[in-house]
Image (cartoon, rainbow, N blue to C red):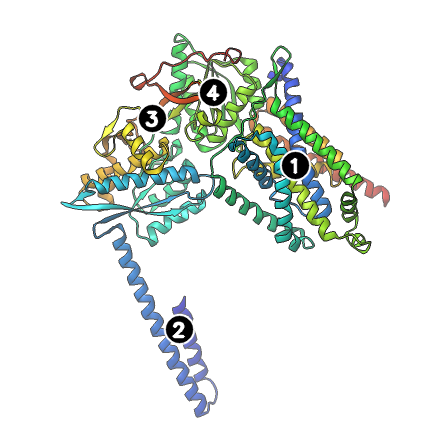
Amino acid sequence: MDLLIFQVPILMVQASLDGALLGILFALIAYGMALQWGVMNIINIAQGEMVILGGYIAYTMYVMGIHPAYGVIVSPIIMYFIGWLLYKLVINRVVDRDLFISILATFGISILTQQLMNFIFGADVVVAQSNFGTTLLFDDMVTLPNAKIFSALIGIIFAIGLVLYMKKSKLGRAIRATSQNARAAKILGIDTERVYAATFGINAALCGVAGALISITFTLHPYVGLPYTVRSFMIVIIAGLGNLPGVALSGMGLGVFEEFSDYILGTEFRIGSVFTLLVLILVYRRFRLSRKREYLE
Amino acid sequence: MWVTMVSTGYRCSSGIGLSGERTIDELKINHDMEEKMLKIFHKTLVTTVSVVALMATAVTQARVDGDTITLGAAVSETGKYSTNGKHTRNGYNLAVKRINEMGGVTVGGKSYKFKITYYDDESNSGRAAQLAERLIKQDGVKYMLGPYSSGLTKAIAPVTEENKIPMVEANGASRSLFTKGYKYLFAVLSAANQYLEVAIDLAVEKNGGKPVKIAMAFEQDAFSQDVRLGIVEAAERTSSDIIIDDKLPKELNDMAATLAKVKATRPDVLVVSGHSKGALTAIRQISEMKVDVPMLAMTHCDASKLAKQHGKKSEYALCAAQWHKSLSYSDGFFGDGKKFDSDFTSEYGYAPPYQAAESAAALLVWKAAFERANSFDTEKVRDALALTDMQTFYGNIKFSSAGQNIAKPMVLFQVRCEGDECENRVVAPTKWASAELVHPIPKWSDR
């Protein structure tokens, strides 16, 4: 156990800000997963690969001499169509089936996407340079890369945009109706097939935005998608389906918790501590549910 | 399996024939069936025997067929190691081409050519072990070349050991490869624990011989943890203090916490190893967080194309390498490092990273061993390999009893930039230094 963070309290500020910025980025990916899980009952194992693919789109722009930050506009557009196409080719065949079938199908998509990215972009680890500079606070003791601040801002904008879209637009209302009861929505004239395709497309587009942001904040490699899938899965589990503000809060909370456990327990326990927290939350929820059940009886 | 099925069928038909009353027709049918079964049985037997015979011929022919010596290798063409797999294959292929052009391998007064049978291990250790079995048992390969990465070499080594097949490997540096008592494994490269030891010695030297404060962050994989062990030993030897010792997760994408600790504790040297991802993440975040350290030492700068991808942000980083083109070693096949560099570049269109150089050196070791053994007997060739003591363009090669190359030191280069052009310049060992070490690294506010 390392007590450095208590000896140098300014590190707490650094840890909180780093964690929150990281959490917003993960929450953005989790948003898409929560939406599609809630509407289509599909757990998308290929979520991380879609993020990385979005990142490669921004990276390709960077290689072509375009600033990678424009990737947050281009990448979601391309990814929306890729998502829509994936739905038409694969997902629509498994959407009403057992959850296990859809997990297998998306697992297949994940492997295929990895290999295709490897084939097209190569197995080298790559980065896109934003050259956004750094914000220095508290006598240079707290440093915030502007690329991370930019990522968080874009993440918040897209998250708010999504919530508004779901509430105000016709398609958003159709998506919500389908998620509540697909059969009833169909009877009332909603083209659920189109709703599903759009939902999968929106998820892919959100992955595209997150990927473009990752290309300027972290690194890209065809095989680094899994941590993003796992992290977004955890955020959704903690927040619950259909709880979009909860996703944002749980994303940031997990980010901050992760940073603090890194400082206190050591980097090697960073991921482990988050998983332990997940187990504790699930056990606590079960305990609460069982008490409620007893009361009802 | 076929034989068993057929013979079972044969017994069945005889069984029917013996039980109960039978008409003449029934007997005839049974007789016909028996004859048919016998025919099938004979056919299957003949086919099986021919296949086995063919396979046996293939096995005996595979190791030395006419004037060709076949070496086997499982190297990643797909998966996460595919880029380094390509460097490995290109290194092997260039050396095979060069050796064959220059007269091949002379054994028993006759000249033989090298040929390599490749399989794609998909960057997967289970697959690599399977393919090693296939190369040895089905293809009859008697001499092996290593795959790319410590992990895959660790998967293949038990197979080659069990079958007593000598393997010269060029891309497995993990120390654990040399502590298991393997007799048929020979590595031309320096072990992982030697990678960054030199950096600590250099930091102590620059500190006026006084101990230094070390901060380090290593990925949790076999190779990086071996590099860490080397640093721990160097710290003990120089009585230096390790003030940060972070073990980065394999899915590492963020080192912000480690670097914030470094900022707060101000060590004399920061050591990072986490393959290409670790090197690129470290430089990105060190530059973004304006972390000032007098010395920064890393691995995989070459493989990650650090100087190209991060440009001036990577300046002054010290990098461990197995080989650099400016070293003055030479041999009769590739000449010196610079010649190898230009030959490789004209053949494959890119400058050779050290992974390609060490792979090419493995073939030179094989050639010398065959000629010294003057035989194709695996035991004799293995003994000749063990006695290797030679110089190649890549460095001196002499194996310890554990099969580790003990004759070649690691080199350290420093990334130096002129304008926007950055390149790697050797700074240690001083014998080959082409540039003076810049120490301490200028502060970010002055850069």
Query: Residue visible at 37% across and 25% down?
Result: B194
Instruction: Give me the C-alpha separation between circle 4 and circle 1.
Output: 32 Å
* Mark 3 chain: B
Which mark is drawn over residue B7? 2
User: Callout 2, which amino acid?
Assistant: Ser
Instruction: Give me the C-alpha separation between circle 1 and circle 2.
Output: 62 Å
**Toward which corner of the image does residue A218 lie, by quadrant?**
top right
User: Callout 3, which amino acid?
Assistant: His
Residue lying furthest top in this view? B208
Which is in the foreground here, disc 2 or disc 4? 4
Residue lying furthest bottom in this view? B24
Using the image as rendered, state which of residue A82 and residue A242 is in the foreground: A82
Q: Check disc 3 and report its element: helix, strand or loop.
A: loop
Q: Are marks 4 and 3 in contact (CB under 8 Å)?
A: no
Q: Is residue A271 visible?
A: no
Q: Mark 3: few, some, or many residues within 10 Å (few <14, many ≥20)?
A: many
Q: Earlier in the sequence, mark 2 or mark 4?
A: 2
Q: Earlier in the sequence, mark 3 or mark 2?
A: 2
Query: Residue visible at 67% across and 37% down?
Result: A30
Q: Is residue A118 visible?
A: yes
Instruction: Give me the C-alpha separation between circle 2 and circle 4.
Output: 76 Å
Q: Check disc 4 and report its element: helix, strand or loop.
A: helix
Q: Earlier in the sequence, mark 4 or mark 3?
A: 4
